[in-house]
Amino acid sequence: MDQEQFERPHDPTNGLGPVFNATSCASCHHLELAFADTARLSSGVRGRHLSRNAPTLLNRAYGKTFFWDGRAASLEAGVLLPIENPDELALPLDRLVARLRASPVPSAAVS
């Protein structure tokens, strides 16, 4: 994922309605805050308050478990959970793959 994809807001209505508070990874993981969120509870699609705040993404490649409760055993699994979560980004994986394939910077992972 490149910077444009990280910052690009996602339309949770799939073009079927008005978008309020469209979200992207950067909505909660702020560059100027070490890719973290200072809000007590982060906000997801349609302004939904989540049960936790977004932790930093710095040095996550060295982690053994991911998320506050350790529910993801790998970085790869951890990336998919907030993308698919209906309260966070609400982006089905098939739409994510199509978006990555349409990107001007091809990704080996989706080729």
Image: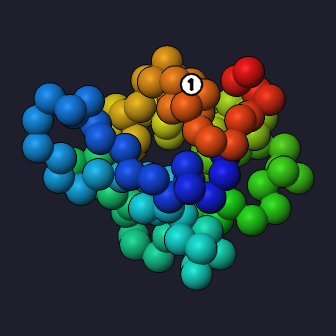
Q: What residue type is labelled 1?
A: Val
Return the x and y of residue 110 as percentages of the image width and height. 70, 24
Does 42 sit left or right of 76 as displayed?
left
Q: In which quarter of the image is the C terminus?
A: top right
> Which of 52/109 is in front?
109
Q: Residue furthest bottom?
A: 32
- Left or right of residue 78: residue 97: left
Residue placed most toward the observer, 98 or 53: 98
> Quadrant location of residue 34?
bottom right
- Viewed as shown, does residue 62 lie left or right of 16? right
The answer, for residue 87, to whether it is visible in the render is: yes
Report the front residue among 62 and 107. Answer: 107
Number of marks: 1
Q: Position of residue 46 (x, y in %)?
A: 21, 48
102 to the left or right of 88: right
Residue that mark 1 sits on: 97
Residue 104 screen position, x and y as percent:
62, 42
Q: Is residue 56 above or below residue 19?
A: below
Residue 91 in percent (x, y) is at 41, 31
Residue shown at 55% from the left, 31% from the top: 102
In which quadrant of the rendered image does the N terminus lie? Answer: top right
Q: Is residue 81 visible?
A: no
